[in-house]
Image: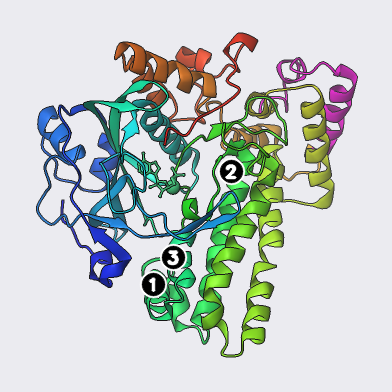
Amino acid sequence: MIFDNSYTQLPNHFFQRISPVAVEKPSLIRLNTPLADELGLQLPDNNQQLAELFSGNVLMEGMDPIAQAYAGHQFGHFVHQLGDGRAVLLGEIVTDQGKRCDIQLKGSGQTAFSRNGDGRSPLGPVIREYVVSEAMHALGIPTARALAMVSTGETVYRETPLPGAILTRMAASFIRVGTFEYFAARNDLKALRTLVDYTIKRHYPEVAKEASPVAHFFRAVCNAQAQLLAQWMCVGFIHGVMNTDNTAISGETIDYGPCAFMDNYNPAQVFSSIDHTGRYAYNQQPLIAQWNMGCLGGCLIPFLHKDEQSAKAIGEDILATFTPTFAHHYRTGMCAKIGLASESDHGFAHVKRLLEIMHQDHVDFTESFRLLSNATTDTPPFASLFSSRKLIDQWVADWQALLDQEARTRAEVSQSMRTTNPAYIPRNHRIEEAIRAAEDHGNFTFTHRLIEVLSTPYADQPNHHEYRKPPEPSERVLQTFCGT
Ligand code: AMP
Ligand code: MG
């Protein structure tokens, strides 16, 4: 690996230099070989050396490990110091395509930001993050990636003793809204300016040439978040902890905790055991993302205009673009799910009607869109998911009339729907099954199989039909946990 670390060139109070805390008996669970190849990483070919590397026991030349400082709004309340309490940024690499990435260990021991935490991670959440982040990537959604996971051979104590593990993950960067809030809360304008300039150069270099680069930067981050949220909503993804410290400036999905995909369509769905008020429910996510962008905007005020009132007005105008941008991407995405090449009021009204029937009949979100992809010619499998047969038959008749106005043949429509409506998502009960086998029996077969099936979510995989099926009532997962 060739490291080219730029964050460590920033002032000292942006991070703490710290090495991962060694673990007893690391063992490699999985290496993401396609990703390692894509990145052009030169890795040892022996599992024990890989385990030593991805546990942080051994550092490679060029690594300059740090824990990053950040703050954040957690469930709406500001916490002025969070930071990497159980993560260590090993360094940055630049791929052959010129893409700069952060490589980070999660679960690598205490840092100056650990507060009362042990700096470790149980195996279950590591498996969940690996599986879900890789599934998101395969679905075409911007996300941090999982490069490797190792078990540590140590016990982590939560409510019960659990096996420990470490995830190696990578992202365009782990700079968060909370990173800006950290310096803004300290009124450290010099550091804030440094961070703004650094982030623009790293993630949005095209705005540097604008007359007001910071305003353009803010607009670009809002756009990236609005697009990301539309993509989450179109696959039924619920992040679970959309705190500002878990919101990446790059527009990638990061910090997978008690995340989940919904099974039956329910706009108010919440899985996270710590989300008591439903703040981060499925249908609240776009609003929350905009709220998070408001927090970022607040940090940028000093750089938007020298007059504070004018600066606020500029920030608010940009923030107001979030809702229409999100709506455009969401409507386009949802219209594509029913086979329409572009969005329109009429087409979207049709989507909403379908969602209402799905909600009322407790129908599986993913499976119904996937079966709808074939319903251009074969309706019974789709229609049979519903108990309100009259309503759905009427809906299908109206939908087919709508498709007749498309410039494409039914076969073409069907084909395009199958590239936007996945057959396979990381279903909660399958993740639970993989975690149970791994934690209780040290058996990773289910984990590996799940990751492999989810790597081609839009393909029909007749040998893995069981991974497509919604849970039986007895298999249904009602709550997910973050494992902090
Ligand atoms: P999260 O909600 O998991 O993103 O974590 C919020 C904050 O708590 C971050 O600053 C984490 O680094 C910190 N944190 C979470 N779990 C632990 C842990 N086991 N030990 C130390 N810090 C932790
Ligand atoms: Mg976090």
Residue assigned mark 2: 232
Seen in the picture, residue 400 relative to 181 is either above or below; the reply is above
Question: Which amino acid lies under the numbered mark 1 shown in the image of this protein?
Answer: Leu
Badge 3 element: helix
How far apart marks 2 and 3 lie (CA) works out to 27 Å
Seen in the picture, residue 47 relative to 329 is either above or below; the reply is above
Question: Which amino acid lies under the numbered mark 2 shown in the image of this protein?
Answer: Trp
| Residues rendered magenta in the picture | 373-402
Residue assigned mark 1: 195
Q: Does residue 95 appear in the picture of this structure?
A: no
Question: Which amino acid lies under the numbered mark 3 shown in the image of this protein?
Answer: Tyr
Q: Mark 3: few, some, or many residues within 10 Å (few <14, many ≥20)?
A: many
Please give the label number shown on residue 288: none
Q: Left or right of 23: which side holds 400?
A: right
Closer mark to the observer between disc 1 and disc 2: 1
Residue assigned mark 3: 182
Measured from the top left, where is residue 196 in percent x and y? 42, 74
